[in-house]
Amino acid sequence: MTAALARRWLAPALVGVVGLALWQTLVVAADVKPYLLPSPTAIAEQLGQVRPLVWSATLATGANALVGMLAGSVTAILAALLAARSRSVDLLLSPTAAAVSVMPIVALAPALNTMFGTTSNTPRRLVVAVVVFAPVFVTTLRGLRQVQPVHRDLLRAYAATPRQAARTVTVPGAVPHVFSGLRVASATAVVAAVVAEYFGGLQNGLGSRITAAAANSAYARAWAFVLGAILLGLTFYVVTLALERVVTRRHGG
Amino acid sequence: MTRLRPVAAALAAVLLAAVLWEVVKVAAPDAGVHVGGASILPRTDAVAMPHVWDVVQRTLQPETSAAGAPSVLSSMLHACWFTLGVAAVGWALGVVAGFALAVLMQRWRVAEESLEPWLVLSQTVPLVALAPLVVGWGGRIHLGGLEWQKWMSVALIASYLAFFPVAVGALRGLQSPAAAQVDLFRAQAAGWGRTLVRLRIPASVPHLLPALRLGAATAVVGAIVAEVSTGTKGGIGRLIISYAQSASGDPAKPWAAIAAAALLGLVAAGLVGLIGLGLRRFRHTEVS
Amino acid sequence: MSTPATAVDARGVGKVFESRSGTVTALQDVHLTVAAGEFVSLIGPSGCGKSTLLRLVADLEEPTSGELVVFGKPPRAAREAGDYGITFQQAGLLPWRTVSANVQLPLELHGVGRRARAMRAAELLALVGLAEFADAFPHQLSGGMQQRVAIARALAEQPSLLLMDEPFGALDEMTREHLQTELLRISASSGAAVLFVTHSIPEAVYLSDRVVVMSARPGRISGIVDVDLAAAADRTEGLREDAAFFAAVTAVREVLHGAPAPAVRGVDVR
């Protein structure tokens, strides 16, 4: 038990440590210029210096990602419920979601900035919402569709009404699928929120800080903000994963 | 007939979106709607939301008022072609690297155990955030006679984004054969290489194709984002920014560029989808 | 109001499936009567339409010809009145519900109050010997235990007819024999008629009052064998080694494999 656990954690941890050490020696020994790659120690030092700024930028970007993700997920789940009920809604929304999932949605950011004004957070939240919509819609709809034939027969045998069928089988059965969609979306939400900032607008988030630092040749500082973005992405992912575990624990997974 | 249905539905969806756009334009106040300091509905004047038909019309007119300026449509096509090329280079690099990593992880359990958490981790973190940094390499590295070009940075970012879905999808695919099938190969004394070629790679197709498609889409996103954060000229990303800057005087132009970028994503995914046509018999249980 | 003496009455029932590759005659001209309280098995090779016949009785499919009457009503009315309970080859439990909540499902769908539901579920779980698993989830149970929960669920509304579609088909032989004896006890105590689909001859003989043998392409009844063993409640494991049991098994096997066996066919074909 403990051996397996150690193996599970030790090997990746070892890779991480060795990777960091290699990075540090490479940068120092080969005298790699900071614009190529700053050393981990230089980044850590910068992080210490600009910690309050990283924190506030992370909060700003995190708020955009959170609001956008909530709005996008709620819309997607409602749309999937509609599409599961109505064939024509499905016919309209399913190809749309498939198309949206391969489109570079961040490209909307500059036009949204014009529409909502450059001092608004709304454009970024909207970008996040659209990016989140596609995976959540697709997985939720798949979950709503995936009723086992034996369960369908059972409901018919007991003369269940459509409403009862939804409450007892369809919706509870879709819950794990909704969460697997949310898990995928949680990671992309943060990516979208950061990247949307590269397209102009307010200068309060991680994305704008990274570009600003890079433009000033403060590369180690830019990496410190990147680290903030990485931690933010992880937080979103882990929180969604934890929620998923709590909600679907009863599904006997 | 059944094949045309989704196409017709997609067209209907586009039409519906256009109608919705015009309805919002008419129904919502020009200055937009704000609730508690957050803007809920956008400004709907001609600058913020041009008519759909104005956008279509604008694509056919010259880009600028300068004599001999190309039409917006032709500059956009050029830009899309450039971005598609860079994204394709990035995609190809990402696919090779991703597949190689998957094979490595399939071959050695140690590799899988030590790398997989990092693979998952790298999917959850915004690595595109690195774009402005990698992009700084342009013109500063010389590899022998080769000078590092800005577009190479863009392709590198794109490959980075294409890499992860491919690695994850390929690994899942290579591990997908049933134990009985693997045992069968073992019983025939087939080595690892033969098992890989005859069993694991064919079996990975249903997992690999969606990953390749997703990789193509993310490569396009990566290329556009990287162009924007570098100011690399010539691509559609740059065009979106430069058109957006002239939005106050020429509001239809940025929307045309956005539509072009959206189409580019569809085309890239569609092109990769063509690969699947030749592999039909391997695709019995495609997982998207 | 008393239950009619006939649970199921099929008169010339046929079922044709239309598909892109053509039409398949799953059932042709089936005549069958199941009396109230009677245990009848349907047996035959795959494709003989035995499951289809059961699904027609359950109103999960509709016949394309002939007439089907369940307790004097059309199948649809019988289904909506909750006249039968049903089990399938898969237990089909809802994985997110506890064992007890799964048993309560039919009662819940038909508006029975919470307390009454819980009491009935406790009763049923005691009947199938799973009282201590009321709060467990299906994935914590073995296949045989899951199937017992499904039987308890089918009995929830005290139906006068049990429809069972290869309920023990996916279980190992030992669990299977154990559950067969259990089912005999349960069906005897409930007094319900049972229509039981199986592809195991010993299973059909051990359980049934009558075994209906079907043949494929097109699916129809090729003969009916009366099993004259002890009353359901008195059948025990020892019966499996009884000469009368073997004789009945042989009789069924002959109808099943025999070329048209007019002698047997004459026994009880209606």
Image (cartoon, coloured by chain):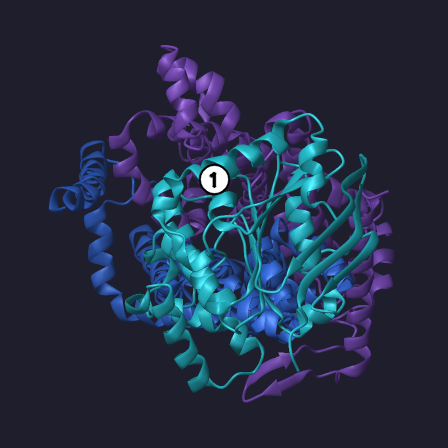
Q: Quadrant of residue C84?
A: bottom right
SS assignment at label 1:
helix
For the image, the number of numbered tags is 1
- Please report, as a chain letter, where disc 1 is located: C
- Give x and y (percent) for residue C86: 56, 61
Q: Whole-percent x and y of residue C183?
A: 44, 57
Closer to the camera in the image, C197 or C252: C252
Q: Residue furthest bottom?
A: B36
Q: Is residue C269 above or below residue B203?
A: below
Q: Position of residue A54 (x, y in %)?
A: 32, 66
The amino acid pointed to by label 1 is Pro
* Nearer-the-camera pick, C130 or B97: C130
Q: Is residue A182 left or right of residue B7?
A: left
**Quarter of the image containing the N terminus of chain C?**
bottom right
Figure colour of chain C: cyan
**Residue A236, percent across and down?**
38, 63
Chain B rendered in what hue?
purple
Residue in the image at 41% along x and 71% along y: C124
**Which residue is at a point 39% across and 28% down the rendered structure image?**
B179
Q: Is residue A10 left or right of residue B69?
A: left
Left or right: C55 in relation to C91: right
Any part of residue B54 in sight: yes
| Nearer to me, A65 or C127 | C127
Which residue is at a point 58% across and 79% down the rendered structure image? C110
Circle 1 residue: C202
Q: Quadrant of residue B250?
A: bottom right
Residue in front for this viewpoint, B59 or A34: B59
On screen, residue C22 versus residue C101, left or right, reads right
> Could you tell me if residue C169 is visible in this image?
no
| Residue A34 against residue A129 in the figure, above or below | above
Chain A colour is: blue
